Amino acid sequence: MTDLELLNLAVNAMENAYSPYSEFKVGAALLCENGDVYCGANIENSSYSATICAERVALFKAVSDRQTSFKSMAVVGCYPVKTQDFCYPCGVCLQTLREFCAPDFKIITANSLGDIKEFTLKELLPYGFSLGR
Ligand code: THU
């Protein structure tokens, strides 16, 4: 699975977003070490706080299938109008990824013009919380 293929899966997943409040669609595709891929889209709620991000939908689907090793995740997001903005995982999603993924876990993002950026989890969350046990 190439980064580009993973990004394309995230773009497809984005179409499944339930985002009537923000109208901002996000798609995520998570590649497991064993080659399996789990996709997710953001699911909003009229209470707003019950909204869940695409990244955590993908991760929770994988973890609830007993997946334990993860390689990379592609994330894309946009409003109906295309922009050059990139969609980065929010702080809650980064902390959630930190629970299950190594510091060199790769996060790939693209804007709607097709530009691509790559980071490690450690780069986006240098000081994540840990109980230190
Ligand atoms: N959202 C995600 O799905 N992932 C993120 O990392 C940040 C934000 C969603 C939540 C909400 O449905 C919409 O984007 C606007 O905040």
Image (cartoon, rainbow, N blue to C red):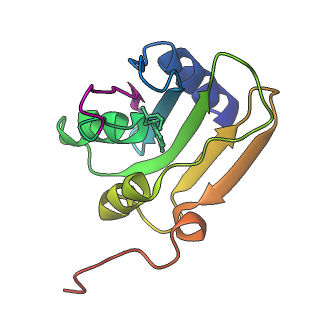
Report the side of 64 relative to 75 (left or right).
Answer: left
Report the side of 126 relative to 66 (left or right).
Answer: right
Among the 4 quarters of the image, the one containing residue 20:
top left
Residue 31 rendering spot, x and y as whole percentages: 46, 38
Residue 92 rendering spot, x and y as whole percentages: 37, 56
Among the 4 quarters of the image, the one containing residue 120:
bottom right
Position of the N terminus, as image quadrant, is top right
Against 120, residue 85 (above or below) is: above
Q: Which residues are magenta?
A: 36-48
Position of the C terminus, as image quadrant, is bottom left
Q: Residue at x 39, y 52 (%)?
A: 93
Labels in figure, total: 0
Magenta highlight on residue 47: yes
Among the 4 quarters of the image, the one containing residue 85:
top right
Q: In the image shown, does 92 or 13 lie closer to the viewer?
A: 92
Q: Residue at x 43, y 58 (%)?
A: 94
Against 11, residue 108 (above or below) is: below
Residue furthest toward the bottom? 132
Q: Residue at x 59, y 31 (%)?
A: 77
Residue 98 rendering spot, x and y as whole percentages: 37, 63
Magenta highlight on residue 42: yes
Q: Residue at x 75, y 26 (%)?
A: 112
Q: In the image shown, does 124 or 61 lie closer to the viewer?
A: 124
Q: In the image shown, does 84 or 94 lie closer to the viewer?
A: 84
Residue 6 rendering spot, x and y as whole percentages: 58, 30
Query: How would you classify the magenta stretch by its main secondary structure?
Result: loop
